[in-house]
């Protein structure tokens, strides 16, 4: 069988070498050279990361990680385990041959492995992007036979190893689809084909770091042509509170839903109105971070539009802080904090894109702990010295003092994390950040609670919630309202 397969491999190689392939002579030799050392795929990944949004960056990262695993496997195990000579070039026209011939083992093809790994990894994040890359990956793999440096069997084995590497990476780091927030509890919401009955309040200034403002109405109508769009907080817009109240009244008249385009602060304001009026909320991510939308599983206007048109929705928790039992208080969908936590997150996010999440977390901890002083508060009736008190609406994942994501938006708990002050607290916390084990540090306290009381804040203490800052002194009560908000979200099949 081994001899039979070897003979078949050689005959197929000779058949490809002696055949004329229209147009291939201009393209394939250049394509195979561009893929040397993975440069073609690194270039595609860099372009996607620079020009695309968060989904493109995630797909690029998964593709590169799969390529790295495939390359390491081929060069450490594949080529050292099977020693196979390169094909003889007698049958390959000279014009096709590479100027510099490879000298390593022919089996398996590293170019084919890298191409298959990158395309498969991208496919796992977005099947359409992966399918678009498939012809390029197949052409790179075929070019190795066309230029005479590999047998067809080498290419097939390399492609299989590359696809296997992408599967291995997916097993170690599950995709967004595998880690999608639980589609429960499902909630009733009207299906609005074309967005008919949806009244969207858009904040044109959200997510803009330059003076140029996008045409939010055009963006919404591109995916939901029959939705009504109201602009707020702009030169031609209403104040946000007035716009949201008017939009909610209009949505109730139509029997539809309230929509919002903006960042987390704008979404917070819209959610407050939606809860008060008993309306479902459609969140179209238009801010810088879009924490709530991304944790919900909505990363684009198109995804939000499909959920609105199909009527797919879930009920999620909201949290509220207030100064007294009879006060209305304020809602937060993501986080509430006092102390230095907002500054820590600001520094970390500013540097994370340049140096990576872990180094940025260390830098943020150092900067904050170097300049900040702890504050005295009462937590649950006990006086404590703390640098920061973080409270998340539902449990967060990530570093102990700087969590970043949630998996379940209806778990019924407040995620409470306290960075304590005291002797050597700065040194201990920085050491925990350097070792990547902040959860084990005695400086960090964590709890999951349905209700929390905070006192001793002074008359004008600054609190941060969902990217907004407010002054709220005295004693605060934080509590959950379970499944109080209905939001549109695509449900798994």
Image: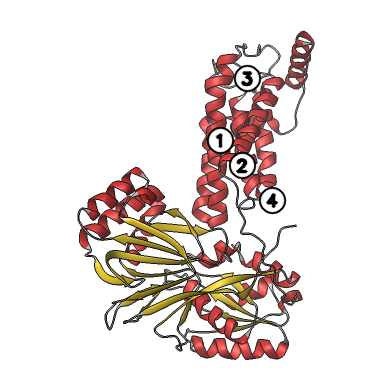
The mark lying in front, picked from 3 and 4, is: 4
From this view, report whether residue 104 is shown above or below residue 232: above
Residue at image location 29% in from the left, 60% down from the top: 420
Circle 2/circle 1 CB separation < 8 Å:
yes
Disc 1 marks which residue?
67
Residue 46 is situated, as x and y percent measured from the top left of the image, at 50, 46
Which is nearer the N-term, disc 1 or disc 4?
A: 1
Q: What separation in Å lies between label 1 and label 3 (alpha carbons)?
A: 20 Å
Position of 33 relative to 448 (above/below): above
Q: What is the secondary structure assignment of the residue under circle 1?
A: helix
* First-in-chain label (2 vs 3): 2
Mark in the foreground, 1 or 3: 1
Residue 172 screen position, x and y as percent: 56, 40
User: Coloring scheme of the render?
Assistant: secondary structure
Residue at 21%, 65% (x, y): give it: 373
Mark 2: secondary structure: helix
Q: Quadrant of residue 74?
A: top right
> Given the current orientation, which residue lies at the most extreme top position?
3
**Which residue corresponds to mark 4?**
128
How far is mark 1 from mark 4, CA to CA? Answer: 19 Å
Locate residue 56 relative to residue 382 in the image: left or right. right
**Image quarter in which the N terminus is found:** top right
Whether pointer 4 and pointer 2 mark residues with C-beta atoms closer than 8 Å, the reply is no
Query: Residue tagged by mark 2?
Result: 121
């Amino acid at each position: 069988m081994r001899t039979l397969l070897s003979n078949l491999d050689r005959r197929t190689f000779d058949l490809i070498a002696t055949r004329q392939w229209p147009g291939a002579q201009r393209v394939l030799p250049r394509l195979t050279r561009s893929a040397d050392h993975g440069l073609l795929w690194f270039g595609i990944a860099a372009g996607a990361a620079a020009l695309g949004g968060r989904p493109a960056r995630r797909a690029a990262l998964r593709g590169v990680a799969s390529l790295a695993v495939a390359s390491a496997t081929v060069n450490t195990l594949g080529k050292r385990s099977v020693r196979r000579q390169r094909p003889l070039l007698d049958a390959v026209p000279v014009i096709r041959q590479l100027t510099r011939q490879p000298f390593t083992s022919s089996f398996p093809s590293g170019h084919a492995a890298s191409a298959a790994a990158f395309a498969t990894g991208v496919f796992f994040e977005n099947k359409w992007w992966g399918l678009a890359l498939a012809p390029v990956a197949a052409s790179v793999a075929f070019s190795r036979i066309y230029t005479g440096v590999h047998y067809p069997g080498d290419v097939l084995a390399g492609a299989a190893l590359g696809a296997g590497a992408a599967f291995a990476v997916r097993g170690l780091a599950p995709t967004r689809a595998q880690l999608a927030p639980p589609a429960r509890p499902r909630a009733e919401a009207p299906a609005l084909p074309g967005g008919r009955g949806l009244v969207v309040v858009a904040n044109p200034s959200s997510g803009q770091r330059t003076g140029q403002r996008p045409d939010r109405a055009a963006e919404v109508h591109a995916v939901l042509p029959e939705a009504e769009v109201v602009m707020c907080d702009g030169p031609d817009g209403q104040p946000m509170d007035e716009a949201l109240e008017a939009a909610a009244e209009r949505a109730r008249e139509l029997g539809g839903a309230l929509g919002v385009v903006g960042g987390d602060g704008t979404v917070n304001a819209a959610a407050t109105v939606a809860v008060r009026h008993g309306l479902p909320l459609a969140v179209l991510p238009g801010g810088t971070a879009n924490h709530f939308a991304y944790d919900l599983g909505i990363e684009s206007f198109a995804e939000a539009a499909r959920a609105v048109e199909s009527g797919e929705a879930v009920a999620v928790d909201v949290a509220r802080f207030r100064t007294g039992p009879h006060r209305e208080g304020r809602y937060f969908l993501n986080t509430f904090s006092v102390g230095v936590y907002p500054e820590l997150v600001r520094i970390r996010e500013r540097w994370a894109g340049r140096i990576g999440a872990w180094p940025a977390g260390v830098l943020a901890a150092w900067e904050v702990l170097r300049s900040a002083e702890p504050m005295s508060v009462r937590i649950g009736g006990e006086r404590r010295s703390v640098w920061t008190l973080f409270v998340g609406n539902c449990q967060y994942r990530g570093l102990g003092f700087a969590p970043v994501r949630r998996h379940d938006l209806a778990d019924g708990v407040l995620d409470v994390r306290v960075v304590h002050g005291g002797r050597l607290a700065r040194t201990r916390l920085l050491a925990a950040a350097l070792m990547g084990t902040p959860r084990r540090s005695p400086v960090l306290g964590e709890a999951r609670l349905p209700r929390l009381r905070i006192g001793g804040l002074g008359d004008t203490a600054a609190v941060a919630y969902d990217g907004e800052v407010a002054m709220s002194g005295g004693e605060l009560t934080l509590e959950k309202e379970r499944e109080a908000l209905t939001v549109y979200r695509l449900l798994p099949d």
